[in-house]
Image: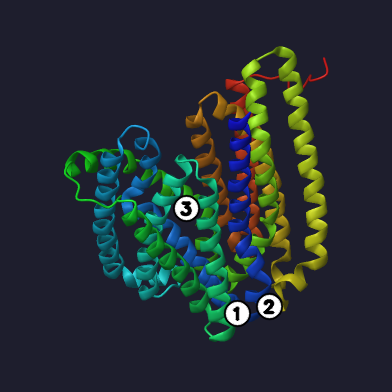
Amino acid sequence: MHIKNQVLGNALIYLVANVFNAAIPFILLPILTRVLSPSDYGVVSMFLVMLSIFSAVVGLSMNGVISIRYFQLGRAQLAEYISTITIMLVFTTFVSIAAVILAGDWMASTTGVPVGWLIVAVIVAGVQFVVNIKLTLLQVEGKAKKFGVLQVSQSSINAIASLWLVLIAGMAWQGRVLGHALSVGLLGLVVMLWMSRDKLFVKPHAWREYGKDAVRFGLPLIPHAIGGWLLIAGDRFIVKENLGLADTGIYMAAMQVGMGLHMAYEAFFRSWHPAITKSVIKDEVKNRKLLVLSVYKVVSGAFLALSIYCLLIWLIYPWLVGERFSAGIWIALIFAVSAFFGACYYSTAIFMHIQNRNDLLAINTFVSGGIGLVLSFILCRDFGLVGVAVGMLIGKILAFIFCWISANHVFPMPWLRPFS
């Protein structure tokens, strides 16, 4: 019982920390949209997109292996492993900076972010890599409270620094971007001192062996990570290239409001999925009928939440974002509907996770996301921002349909006869 309570308590801490993190941009929105112009907000959006892409490249996605090697290596060996990865991180960071300098003009033209700030994004990605290593260690060690404090501290510093730089110091988009960079930098310094105190930075003797192992794990994940981020953020590249930074800012603000519903859905599924997993383990025919009814109830509840959320958007959106961003109200509504189909997707994807068929899930996601991006590009020319959002919505709908078909293939259930 003690272990069960500890697991539930840790899960609650992780959930609160994640929701707080996701809520920060939403909380800042009403303030920043009244201070920053749509073009400024567009630059912030593109900076964050590039930061995500650099995060997949810098460090070669090697930090994920820590959660596995933690249980396979002794403390001294783990310290050497972490030190090896950190040294490689420094090297890949400098290589990435050199690449940005060489391709700076093209990247700045494509993203609207000046070369100097793209270099800042690379450095921030590198420091965040080290912070993520510590977060991973805290998670595998079961230290949920320290994990939550570290994550929430970074989000809080981010918000406070951004507001101070924009509102008090009078900076424009640079203040929001610098606030983000300062929060990562400060937490990075704390984490490096913390890890040094725990003697996790040592001279690695088996650096060749550990380096090869880390690269073998991380290198194949880079195309997957970049591809995934392009599917998620590709719509902003389409808007920027075809409509400009101002429309990118309007689009980004609307997307944040519309996807606010996603946070509520995600919080629910974090508690619902373990219960479903437990039911599936019993694998009874009667139980599968109950599972179908449970999914139908979840989808019905998600639709009710969508209806209420859309009504709220319609009533408060102009007040929430200000007059300069109010043209994005339809975009926000479309993204709210996208969040609903995301909930439908998660309600069936769990069965593929349980059957260990993530390969099908990845294929479905890439195919549907790719179709959504192509449609966004095509519709953008005739319908502007609404066309881009509709293209992404179609991609979400297809993701759900493909997922439902695949889930029913690997885990058949009586979807059309739950009462028989």
Q: Nearer the viewer, residue 97 or 401?
A: 97
Q: Quadrant of residue 25?
A: bottom right
The residue at 26%/41% (across/down) is 76
Near mark 2 (Cα within 10 A), the count class, few <14, some 14-19 or many ≥20, is some
- Which comes before the other along the chain, label 1 or label 2? 1
The residue at 82%/53% (across/down) is 308
The residue at 83%/18% (across/down) is 419
Whole-percent x, y for residue 222 in the image:
36, 46
Measure the alpha-carbon separation of dots 1 and 2: 7 Å
| Type of the residue with mark 2 | Arg
| Type of the residue with mark 1 | Ser
Which numbered dot is residue 324? Answer: 2
Q: Nearer the viewer, residue 141 or 208?
A: 141
Dividing the image into 4 quarters, which one contains the C terminus?
top right
Whole-percent x, y for residue 280 in the image:
64, 21
Which numbered dot is residue 37? Answer: 1
- The residue beneath circle 3 is 230
- Which comes before the other along the chain, label 3 or label 1? 1
Q: Nearer the viewer, residue 53 or 230?
A: 53
